[in-house]
Amino acid sequence: MARAGKGSLSSLLLLLAVVLAASTALASAEEANAPLVLPSARAASSSSTSCLDNPPDMTVTGAEAGQTAPDFHGVEAYLTGSRRAHRAIVLASDYYGFEAPKLRQIADQVAALGYYVVVPDLLHRDPFKDGFSFEEWIKTHSPADAAEKVQPLIAALTKEGKSVGFGGYCWGAKVAVELAKTDEIQAVVISHPSLVTVHDMKKIKCHIAVLGGEYDTRSPPQLVQQFQRVLEQNEAIDHMVKIFPRVPHGFACRYNSSDPFAVKTAEEAREDMASWFTKHLKHESESFQFQRAAGI
Ligand SMILES: *[C@@H]1O[C@H](CO)[C@@H](O)[C@H](O)[C@H]1NC(C)=O
């Protein structure tokens, strides 16, 4: 209890600090009549709760290439791409869940590169909504529990002879990191992570790419650089760390579709994720040999 209280107090203080910094920055920008938006002011518009500030537009339903399965190895999931693909990618959503149209679009686009893509509902049909208390909600939406819940699904894909990668956004990045501490997956990509710590980075056992945003206040560049320093010490795995300039938290899956720079950055983040999996998931011939060796 004491810890939770302290946590909320420090988030509050952080929020206050960010708001204060923003008003100062805005005031000085106005005084100087500066045409540029200062980084600190932009960062402030995506405060420590930024992930919760800008919910996805659930009404924008495009043509989805895949379909949902009510029970895919124990979890409801959106499935897209060829079931016969030798490489599978599991994508874990942010706080807003697996129905977000942009997340499904990313899944479809990655599937078009030749992957079987699974977007499981790890928030058990209870995504975060405006008006919820985050402190209460997170108690019943633990990323560690979600990582356990998704393991049978990953095991089933692996048993089919697929090489499995895991991509996580925001809340889902913490799920990805929990899985990366096990031997279950071959590679992970985390985009604008939430809740991920330097301590987590010390326990990573698979190839990892970290995609951060310059104006992300949840995982600011300083924290992402600390992740990088830890990963540099780990010679057993490959890592990549990239900080995308001039974008806030959520840039990879909850970007502003009317802003060409935001759209371009999200595309680049998606391509970087796909390249990481192309580099680190086993290719078809290797998988085939694996299947033969395993007698599948
Ligand atoms: C999205 O981008 C457009 C174009 O830059 C801008 O006019 C609009 O205010 C932005 N919307 C939000 C919610 O930031």
Image: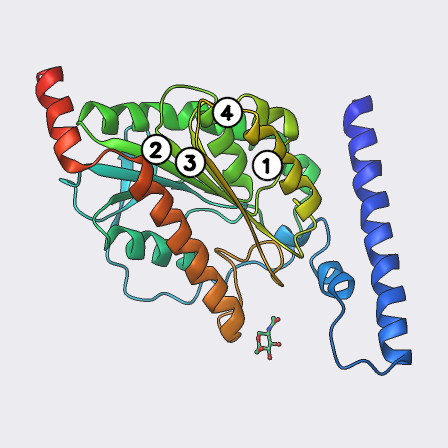
Residue name at image x 52 percent, y 63 percent? 255
Structural crowding at the residue carrying mark 1, measured as other residues with C-alpha within 10 Å and reported as few (<14), some (14–19) or many (≥20): some
Task: Locate ligand 1 by image quadrant.
Answer: bottom right
Instruction: Say whether disc 3 or disc 4 marks the residue closer to the N-terminus.
Output: 3
| Image marks 3 and 4: residues in contact by CB distance under 8 Å | yes
Place of residue 203 in the rendered image (x, y in percent of width and height, measured from the top left):
54, 21
In what element is the residue under mark 4? loop
Structural crowding at the residue carrying mark 2, measured as other residues with C-alpha within 10 Å and reported as few (<14), some (14–19) or many (≥20): some
Distance from Cα at disc 1 to Cα at disc 3: 15 Å
Instruction: Say whether disc 1 or disc 3 marks the residue closer to the N-terminus.
Output: 3
Instruction: Determine whether the beta carbon of the residue marked 2 sits less than 8 angstroms from the nearest atom of ligand 1.
Output: no
Q: Which quadrant is home to the C terminus?
A: top left
Image vertical order of residue 259 relative to residue 202, above or below: below
Of marks 2 and 4, the one in the foreground: 4
Residue type (three-letter) at the residue carrying disc 2: Val
* Residue topped by disc 3: 188
In what element is the residue under mark 2? strand
Q: Which quadrant is home to the N terminus?
A: top right
* Residue topped by disc 4: 204
Instruction: Determine whether the beta carbon of the residue marked 3 sits less than 8 angstroms from the nearest atom of ligand 1.
Output: no
Taking depth in this image into account, of 210 and 27 the one nearest to the observer is 210
Instruction: Say whether disc 2 or disc 1 marks the residue closer to the N-terminus.
Output: 2
> Which disc is residue 75 wearing?
2
Instruction: Say whether disc 2 or disc 4 marks the residue closer to the N-terminus.
Output: 2
Structural crowding at the residue carrying mark 4, measured as other residues with C-alpha within 10 Å and reported as few (<14), some (14–19) or many (≥20): many
